[in-house]
Amino acid sequence: MQYHYLLAGLEDLSLTSGVSLTEDQLLEQFQDQLSPRDWKLLSTLCVPSDDERFVKMAADYRQKMEDEDEPIRLSEEDLRAQMLYEWGMKSHNRLIREWYEFNLNINNVLAATICRKHGFDVNKAIVGETEICELIRQNKNAKDFGLSGTLPEINDILHLAEIDNLLDREKMQDALRWHWLEEHTLFFHFEIENVIAYWLQTQILHRWDNLTMEEGQRIFRALVADMKKDVKFEDEKK
């Protein structure tokens, strides 16, 4: 199904623009004009990692690992995130599947880089069981984590990790996501993929409205604190 009138009536977006509609206003507009099937598809992008389904999936996974006497590498938050990514990568829509995997790759490479820099265990920060996840775990000492030739964006992501200004790093990370959306919807015309990309780009702009240097520092401190917590836990076990 195509959405000529819906997309033509939306305001133009750019990385330097704001967005006038709130998230609720935009979702209301989409719900009124999308088919039930496409509305359900778009709604999957609004599900947070603390949704009860992922909490239950994480609990079931943890129980399974305990029953098999296997170690659990991830924190509860990361485990729920893994459930979310795995769920998203099973979508019947290719753009959504690849979007979730793209974000998983960005987050894992950045987390692995931070771990390597601060001497943390890379294996405890990698979320997911994809081929790229395994390559990072197996090549954690390689500059590119063994991803050259496998992950097209690896150099861009590694460049992000070198940016010292945390606010600039967060914004450049979102700019990479923005351009990815543009490239992956280039050959769609007024289809649900264009609506999905528009929604995700508005999410980026709304995030920038609230992103300050203090918020960037808070995100980074929380990430490092979580990794230190894992180190401390391992030391206590010994």
Image (cartoon, rainbow, N blue to C red):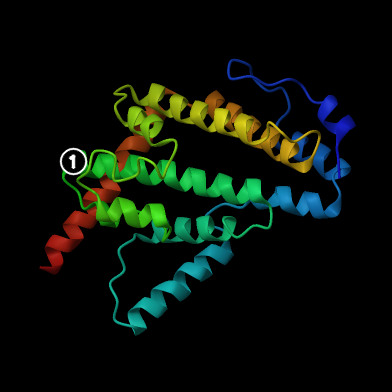
Q: Quadrant of the C terminus?
A: bottom left
Q: Is residue 128 above or below residue 211?
A: below
Quick check: 99 left or right of 110? right
Q: Quadrant of the N terminus?
A: top right
Task: Determine which quarter of the picture holds residue 3.
Answer: top right
Task: Determine which quarter of the picture holds residue 188.
Answer: top right
Q: Residue furthest top?
A: 16
Quick check: 161 left or right of 190? left
Residue 151's x, y, as percent? 42, 42
Residue 11's x, y, as percent? 76, 21
Q: Is residue 159 above or below residue 115?
A: above
Residue at 79% in and 49% down: 39
Q: Residue furthest front?
A: 149
Query: Which amino acid type corresponds to the residue marked 1 in the rendered image?
Result: His
Q: Secondary structure at mark 1?
A: helix
Say whether residue 229 is visible.
yes
Residue 19's x, y, as percent? 68, 23
Residue at 29% in and 49% down: 226
Q: Residue furthest bottom?
A: 67
Task: Determine which quarter of the picture holds residue 111.
Answer: top left
Residue at 26% in and 49% down: 227
Residue named by callout 1: 118
Quick check: 20 left or right of 206? right
Q: Nearer the viewer, residue 55 or 111?
A: 111
Quick check: 64 left or right of 42? left
Say whether residue 213 is visible.
no
